[in-house]
Image (cartoon, coloured by chain):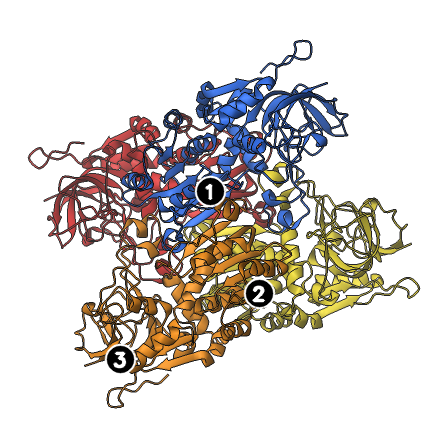
Chain colours: A yellow, B red, C blue, D orange
Amino acid sequence: MPQVAVIPKPNAPVELREVPAPELEENSALLEVKLSEVCGTDVYLQQGRLEGVPYPLVPGHVSVGRLSEIRGTLLDVEGREFREGDRVTFLDVHRTCNACWYCLVAKATTRCRQRKVYGITYGLDDGLCGGWAEQIYLKPGTRCIRLDADAETFMAGGCALPTALHAVERGEIAIGDTVLVLGSGPVGINGIILSLMRGALRVLCIGAPDQRLEAATQVGASAVLNFEEHKEGERLEWTREQTHGRGADVTIEATGAPDAVVQAMRFTRDAGRVVVVGQYTDHGPVSIEAGFNPHLDLNRKHLDVRGCWGSDFSHFYRGAQIVSDSVRSAPWVALKAKLSRYTLEQANEALNDVASGRVLKALIAPEYASSRSQIHN
Amino acid sequence: MPQVAVIPKPNAPVELREVPAPELEENSALLEVKLSEVCGTDVYLQQGRLEGVPYPLVPGHVSVGRLSEIRGTLLDVEGREFREGDRVTFLDVHRTCNACWYCLVAKATTRCRQRKVYGITYGLDDGLCGGWAEQIYLKPGTRCIRLDADAETFMAGGCALPTALHAVERGEIAIGDTVLVLGSGPVGINGIILSLMRGALRVLCIGAPDQRLEAATQVGASAVLNFEEHKEGERLEWTREQTHGRGADVTIEATGAPDAVVQAMRFTRDAGRVVVVGQYTDHGPVSIEAGFNPHLDLNRKHLDVRGCWGSDFSHFYRGAQIVSDSVRSAPWVALKAKLSRYTLEQANEALNDVASGRVLKALIAPEYASSRSQIHN
Amino acid sequence: MPQVAVIPKPNAPVELREVPAPELEENSALLEVKLSEVCGTDVYLQQGRLEGVPYPLVPGHVSVGRLSEIRGTLLDVEGREFREGDRVTFLDVHRTCNACWYCLVAKATTRCRQRKVYGITYGLDDGLCGGWAEQIYLKPGTRCIRLDADAETFMAGGCALPTALHAVERGEIAIGDTVLVLGSGPVGINGIILSLMRGALRVLCIGAPDQRLEAATQVGASAVLNFEEHKEGERLEWTREQTHGRGADVTIEATGAPDAVVQAMRFTRDAGRVVVVGQYTDHGPVSIEAGFNPHLDLNRKHLDVRGCWGSDFSHFYRGAQIVSDSVRSAPWVALKAKLSRYTLEQANEALNDVASGRVLKALIAPEYASSRSQIHN
Amino acid sequence: MPQVAVIPKPNAPVELREVPAPELEENSALLEVKLSEVCGTDVYLQQGRLEGVPYPLVPGHVSVGRLSEIRGTLLDVEGREFREGDRVTFLDVHRTCNACWYCLVAKATTRCRQRKVYGITYGLDDGLCGGWAEQIYLKPGTRCIRLDADAETFMAGGCALPTALHAVERGEIAIGDTVLVLGSGPVGINGIILSLMRGALRVLCIGAPDQRLEAATQVGASAVLNFEEHKEGERLEWTREQTHGRGADVTIEATGAPDAVVQAMRFTRDAGRVVVVGQYTDHGPVSIEAGFNPHLDLNRKHLDVRGCWGSDFSHFYRGAQIVSDSVRSAPWVALKAKLSRYTLEQANEALNDVASGRVLKALIAPEYASSRSQIHN
């Protein structure tokens, strides 16, 4: 019986359980997990900050592993059949319906109400549907991608890579632009890499703590500023000094803090673009001190402010292609040194380390007993 | 000596003055004013709410009249030469530089720092540069348009027409969309007309007072709601009832009230567009009660929020074409009944009536002594 | 046993057959056909000009009728359940897979290789899958729309309406643009209506014969030219006279003739847009006389040339909403007078009349024996 | 008196002349030329293939030098004043009017009829207006850019860099796309570099001769094919093999050959984009063998075909920024080894070498007598 790590209910510690192996439906598969991610959303899940989560829950929405069993036929987007033994990852979003108004008329598939997400809105009662587990049950219709990259390189991007790709796409960055990234967590770091990949001339980063800003510099940021050591006015001043007094062409707000959304507008040049990315849980209103003045902060400047979080299959697919490319993958290969691994038993420790910002990226690596299976990259 | 109406300084009443007739530079002209507009910006000018206004000021940025004198050559965008006696209007924005970073690299000519605006940032010291006057001096480089529409039909649109056209363009309205317009002043009313002209299936309007909502209905709004009689929650509910529970595809915020910007986000469907239009003066921050929660109000919904005010020549030109067309002009022809005319001497009264919302659109019609000139449409 | 009209093989006349009533799968339905369309594609189907058509074939891809039987649950895009007796139409495209590279990465669902089309790529062996029949079998996953419009108004648009909507969307028509439509068949006529609905100031049409040009004028074209009476040079001259010598802002090529694609480029202003619409069968190369010179005809002018045919659900849905609206539907209500009705027995006559251009729009109206069913609008 | 190289009339060899030093107007300057380009357009100029060229002509539209004299004030787009001695380049396009329909309504400034181009539509009678000269007279309103890059690095891009940037912008390349570049001349090579800079995962190149394809590989092309050794069918096959059988996401046609425009369509996937770039002179029609079938080649595939040539200031400015950046400039620094220098006296030789494709990029480097001036990088 496969072992899983479970959040039994909000604010309760993660605990290990053994659950029955699933019976496979037609055109489904079983994935032996090699690595699964611990991201900020998992911290929120443990804190009970998301609505509609069906606890008990096995977290882990982005994972890599090996197909240990396939029943029926499993195809990739090229129409090629998967084989048992293949190394794959899969889009955490399942069951985008292709039948509702959002899917078919608005063409905003990320807003489909039917969609379910492995590790977030699929709970333990739905089956083996989270990555903090020895096995994941890939239900029929799950979108898998054969992975040429090694597991660690892929997970160095993790869910932050398609999320940041979504943001960079929304930002319509032009060759030669100056991009400002607020936040130096995984989404911020991936935002820096991808802004440069999209042609930004310079990428600035305001974040914390210093070791994350070092990572920002390592992946190509031209200049960084520690927001804990500089007040809003100083950050504005610093941004303007770097941008001929105008502000950034595009600002990507990846901190998740309400006030940062307003600051992002202030740090952006007239007629520029602000992308708010990643955060979709309730972090409260903009503070009175921040004082959002929409006509001065947004309208006088002719700004575009664009929200996004999550990703669709195109972002996930393109991200997987990039990290599988020998040239393009270089920034993520470099980030592998910053990954922290935890066993299933150490899941609570992993959550704490992510919550405190002590680690840049935490991964769960279920340790298989040698009698069960052998995973090779 | 032509007579002008002057705001001598902030918060002082308008007064009449006689000023010397200008000496024409090469490629400039003199316009005998038939009608000039009194818009909300003029109220702010009198209240001293805009920065950098060079008082004493002759207001009136959108005007119609007859070219009474031309020195040198004056061409329209088609390269046709203007003749004395032609009925024209002109873009209030002068001297967009075509040489700065905003003009040439960002291609955001509305953000050019060199631009000057007749009746707003050109003061009396710059010459006869406002429309509340018997004559306007059209400096070299002023962009004139020969007007086929009669003066009243054009002024029924006034500056609100190109402003609303800018907003509707920013909104990227698709055929079949449901558009919600917040505000029933001139920009709101023009926003309704132009949203329908762009293919909206239904346009909803939340505004006040009732006589303006009647105008909204008259120009084609499918449903209207008086915001003075319904709280935010009721307005949200009403909007959802009209939109299968989702909110509007596009919301145009044309009230100028800070809280309305946040409400616009809440009244819009996921992955929809919000256009904030018109207001660029300091009306203070969003209230504590409104409580802007950027991650719930904007980001969770994947919204686009786009600011704009003013217009560029393309909006002004297209607007002038529309009101000159026998079919397209119908809504503005109908609005002519709602115009209120004032003489130069009645300028203070006009400002009061606009400030109080008592009239939908006030126009200054300088009364020429018969010995000076005869204006015929 | 329901009666159907069948094209047994290419170039053979249509013949009537009786086929067994289908056994309904879960979540499928049976539609009693009131009206089904005869369009240009049906002529090509009879002539064998499309590849991969599974003859014998029951043509008729856009139809209106009444749900006579439902098995299981049938939902619309709002999630509302259909009931037996409802008047509906349905998207002819079935089984867009939502699983392939075109659907998920390119987001070009119209290019999905799995898609099947009722009346075109579903043959008689696939079941009751064409509209020239007393009944259509709506397979599970067919996208139905409840129709508020009466059947005739909807069919006055027919498949040309969503096709033209697709084209107009591709053309990104701006308020105030001048649009030139080449062709005055159903797609051309709908292109005129929708260009105006999208804000075109003027729509020109070059087509034939005169009665179709009269229809063009009736739906709002500002000026029309009979191409049979004017050579290419004269048409170019005429277009320029209407457009200050520049050419149209947007040209919609809806003739299906290869040379017209090149002429469309020549008739369009510099930096304008050309939309080629509708034709996707082999009509041969551009003629030597036309002499396509890509660097002069396209590149020197900085043109955008955009191809499209067919439509996706969004076009079909928006089209159905428009014709169901009391105000918006006016042009199609007017066109009802131009519909020609044929019984199933008269299908060959209908094809001939469409092929010759003798009628603007032909419809098949199966005549039910009174003992079977009664259709009321 | 400064020395210039002149094309006296079509098909006549270049000859040297001495011309009087210009008298500077207010806000103009004199540029001592360090390097000026010899590009394909110059070959056409010598062959008399462009219309409206005012011979005698001093060619050379992209040049680098030092400001030797300034009269009045010369500002860059940031509003900073230039000083004598500054190293600069300047946009060859002068006098975009900012007053015509194309500038103001269509916002297609590249299509302004008033624009003049140094070295192409400014002839010797207009003054010292070409770069194959010891000095260039920078008329008032010429848009200069202070150059941080060394002259050779900038000229390694030359006019092909902003042209290719224009094309890549038109191609809307997304991160992860596969781009196919047809042609391996300067525009093709720059197209490869910039497609990668914009996020293309893979760039394929079909060109000739082999040494240019080596340059293509050197700057990052994933795969190259010599078109002289492979027929159209083989090229199509090769492209499909590299793209899962679909064709490229974006194809940039930079050969200038009419048939290549049609091949570009065939080599591109359904719903992809084709950018035709650079060529705007008459190279004749598509050949009968190529047989452009618009409905199969373009429409069935839902292609976008977008023409462009030249560039506007934004492309030129962004290009100058890129080559001035220590990281971004790497590909052009590497290309410096492929530059071929010629003196003014060797201008005919330079033209021949460019016409034959013997050199990748030819530059004119006027040799100043030591008594006149000293140029240091």
Residue with the mark numbered 3: D134
Residue B208 appears at what percent x and percent y?
Answer: 43, 31
Residue with the mark numbered 1: C276
Residue D33 appears at what percent x and percent y?
Answer: 30, 78
Q: Are marks 2 and 3 on the same chain?
A: no
User: Which is in the foreground here, disc 2 or disc 1?
Assistant: 1
- Quadrant for the N terminus of chain C in the image: top right
- Amino acid type assigned to the residue bearing label 2 in the image: Ile
Q: Nearer the viewer, residue D366 or A253?
A: D366
Q: CA distance from mark 3 to mark 1?
A: 51 Å
* Residue sitting at the far top: C371
Q: At 72% across and 24% down in the image, what residue appears?
A: C70
**Are dots 2 and 1 in contact, CB under 8 Å?**
no
The chain holding disc 2 is A
Q: Are marks 3 and 1 on the same chain?
A: no
Residue D222 visible in the shown view = yes
